[in-house]
Image: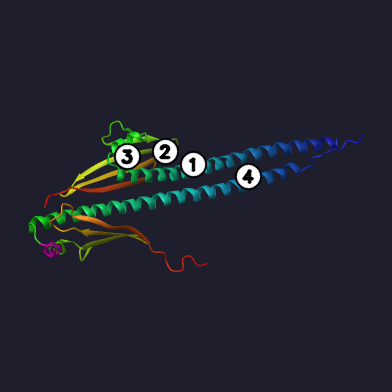
Amino acid sequence: MNKRKVALGPGAASLILIVVVLSLAMLAMLMQISSRNDVSLASRSAEMTARVYDLNAEAERKLAFLDETLLECREELKGGDMQAYLDLLAAKLPAGYDLLDDEVTWMDPLENRIMTCTVKILPPDEKERTEWIAHKLVVEEPEGDWEW
Amino acid sequence: MKQRSRANALLIELVLVIFFFMLGSTVLVRLFADARHKTIQARATNESIAVGQNIAEELYAAGDPEGWLAANGFTAAEGAENTWTLAEKEYTLYVTETIEEKKGGTLRTFTVSSIGEGKQLFTLPSTRYLPKEVSP
């Protein structure tokens, strides 16, 4: 019977060590890059979501302010017609609110997005004062952003 | 004699290889653990933001928010008024209610926040204006 002798020559162990450690280092580096990207993407996503919710909260606060102004107008007019009501509202509305016919619009920008809110002003003889028409977040993509 | 010195050299080489492997693996294991920790953190943030958004939307529309919170496993936080908590595996969710009375109605805000490993992951305010009906 021929016995095959497997000999480990000098330097072979060092060579194996270098290969193994380099491979592990490469793997660790790739894992680090991947996990760092995951963390930054997750925190960016959380930040953007929080900012959109902040915009929504701001829109509700602006609606509350508009509603207060409408109440003041109703108290001053004590009835009155729709046109006088809208004229008084136009005089009382601060900058940032746009009154067009019987609709009030305001916008809040967020980077390349704009939160646009529109409410309809209901006649002064109705119990409710406003009605939501639009409450949307418009994304403005830069031109050619998706071109390769 | 020559064979013996060769065996000694091999032995010394093996000892050195083991030493350097231990040294290298100590650093590498730390790197692997750090990467795993970061991945868990990212997963917790992603999961909690999805759950947090769902809660914020549900609370915005809820007629009985406290009932909804209780039905979904939230418990009132000790020592804090109008605050509810829900502990998940990798993060804890907190919901705080604030009411602001306005002339024409109520501004109700539920602040949904998440804390994972002592770090604030996000804060989502879910605000809704509830106008009062005033007779003309």
**Residue nearest the observer in this picture, A47 or B47:** B47
**Which quadrant does the N terminus of chain B fall into?**
top right
Q: In this view, does A104 lie above or below B101?
A: below
Question: What is the C-alpha distance between the residues marked 2 and 1?
Answer: 11 Å
Q: Which mark is residue A24?
A: 4
Q: Mark 1 or mark 2, which is nearer the start of the sequence? A: 1
Question: What is the C-alpha distance between the residues marked 4 and 3?
Answer: 44 Å
State the residue at coordinates (85%, 37%).
A5
Q: Quadrant of residue B28?
A: top right
Q: In which quarter of the image is residue A87?
A: bottom left
The colour scheme used here is rainbow
Question: What is the C-alpha distance between the residues marked 2 and 4?
Answer: 31 Å
Residue at the disc numbered 3: B95
Q: Position of residue A64 (x, y in %)?
A: 21, 52
Say whether marks 4 and 3 touch (CB < 8 Å): no
Residue at the disc numbered 1: B40
Label 2 residue SS:
loop
Asked if the magenta segment contains residue A19, the reply would be no
Q: Mark 3 lies on which chain?
A: B
State the residue at coordinates (78%, 35%).
B8
Q: Residue B91 carries which label?
A: 2
**Residue nearest the observer in this picture, B80 or A121:** A121
Say whether marks 1 and 3 touch (CB < 8 Å): no
State the residue at coordinates (65%, 47%).
A23
Task: Specify start and end residues of the magenta stretch as a single range.
Answer: A81-87
Q: Which residue lies furthest to the top in this view?
A: B78
**For the residue marked with disc 1, what is the amino acid?**
Ile
Question: What is the C-alpha distance between the residues marked 2 and 3?
Answer: 13 Å
